[in-house]
Image (tube, grey):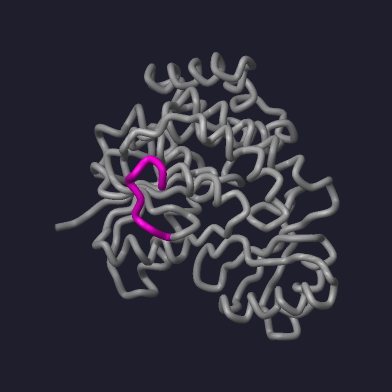
């Protein structure tokens, strides 16, 4: 029997105008925006609709904006989409997933991710940390390049996002990231690029943010979700509230193991992947990874009313 997974995007999928068409067409979506504005105490809805882009790109705004858009989709179209057997979210998207499957309250989640964004941004002074994408290399080679970069610089650099085959992001001290990129070139890396972010997310440099967020997450109420979540840090099926909470704490400084997450979902028999929220990155990665594995799947992204036509 075919199974479905709902996927929720993380930071980087935001854009000015996100959710506008959905809010115009659907009262349920407008209500989510109103709830977000009330919870945060400022007009996030205006920032999402009109920008400016530089303000929307600030981590403390980006994270609640993406969460809000994903929940606008989930609440508006959830009943018209295949019911999820599993859910997963890329970094921040794990919060969206937990709201959508009934484990976390939206108001609490949107406040929490704003604080998460602030904590992650302030954990490392601007300019001290960096992130870079390494394309066309195996995980083992990227890990080796990071090891060389750390040894050469005397600083920290680690794989931060295992996004898909040959698509790995590294993070750490800026000098160590540069050294790791040099080591990757020497190992035959096809392409590498610094990312336009101001903090080294999902690296040990995020430990101060993790320490800040641990008691905040400890104070949140988690319910048992409607379906299991595949969490980022362990690539494990989680349904118990304490396991879900613990995963959110540890993912702040832990790597996002997205390739392994998709592999687990494919092993579980998922043949329908639906990305809820802005962008099409995760649905694209699912389609590509399934094709490489020789598995035929359907993969969709739903972010606006016209996207529903994909489902037939």
Name the quadrant of the C terminus: top left
- State left or right for residue 137 relative to residue 19: right
Query: Up-down: is 87 above or below 218?
Result: below
Q: Does residue 223 show up magenta in the picture? A: no
Q: Quadrant of residue 211?
A: top right
Identify the residue at the far bottom of this view: 187
Residue 71 % position (x, y): 43, 31
- State left or right for residue 14 relative to residue 275: right
The residue stretch that appears in magenta: 235-243
Front residue of 27 and 203: 203
Query: Up-down: is 181 above or below 93?
Result: below
Front residue of 55 and 205: 205
Q: Residue at x 56, y 17 (%)?
A: 37
- State left or right for residue 38 relative to residue 153: left
Residue 196 % position (x, y): 74, 51
Front residue of 77 and 256: 256
Q: Residue at x 84, y 53 (%)?
A: 128
Q: Quadrant of residue 267?
A: bottom left
| Labels in figure, total | 0
Q: Quadrant of residue 272?
A: bottom left
Residue 63 % position (x, y): 59, 36
Q: Does residue 239 show up magenta in the picture? A: yes
Q: Residue at x 75, y 44 (%)?
A: 123
Name the quadrant of the N terminus: bottom left
Residue 61 % position (x, y): 65, 31
Identify the residue at the far left of this view: 1
Query: Up-down: is 151 above or below 27?
Result: below
Query: Up-down: is 166 above or below 118?
Result: below
- State left or right for residue 110 relative to residue 30: right
């Amino acid at each position: 029997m075919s199974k479905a997974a709902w996927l929720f995007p993380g930071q980087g999928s935001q854009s000015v105008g996100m959710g506008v068409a959905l809010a115009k067409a659907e009262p349920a979506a407008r209500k989510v925006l109103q709830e977000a504005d009330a919870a945060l105490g400022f007009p996030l809805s205006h920032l999402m609709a009109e920008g400016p882009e530089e303000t929307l790109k600030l981590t403390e705004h980006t994270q609640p904006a993406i969460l809000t858009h994903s929940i606008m989709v989930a609440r508006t179209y959830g009943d018209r989409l295949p019911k999820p057997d599993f859910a997963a979210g890329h970094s921040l998207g794990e919060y969206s997933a937990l709201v959508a499957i009934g484990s976390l309250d939206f108001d609490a989640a949107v406040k929490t991710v704003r604080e998460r964004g602030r904590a992650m941004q302030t954990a490392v002074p601007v300019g001290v940390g960096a992130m870079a994408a390494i394309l066309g290399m195996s995980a083992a080679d990227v890990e080796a390049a990071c090891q060389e970069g750390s040894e050469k610089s005397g600083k920290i650099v680690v794989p931060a996002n295992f996004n898909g085959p040959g698509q790995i992001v590294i993070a750490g001290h800026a000098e160590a990231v540069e050294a790791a990129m040099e080591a990757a070139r020497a190992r035959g890396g096809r392409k590498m690029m610094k990312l336009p972010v101001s903090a080294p997310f999902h690296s040990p440099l995020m430990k101060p943010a993790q320490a800040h967020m641990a008691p905040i997450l400890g104070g949140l109420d988690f319910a048992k979700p409607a379906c299991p979540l595949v969490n980022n840090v362990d690539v494990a099926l989680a349904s118990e509230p304490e396991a879900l909470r613990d995963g959110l704490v540890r993912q702040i400084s832990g790597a996002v193991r997205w390739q392994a997450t998709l592999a687990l979902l494919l092993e579980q028999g998922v043949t329908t992947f639906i990305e809820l929220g802005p962008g099409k990155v995760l649905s694209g990665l699912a389609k590509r990874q399934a094709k490489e594995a020789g598995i035929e799947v359907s993969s969709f992204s739903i972010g606006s009313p016209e996207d529903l036509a994909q489902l037939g």
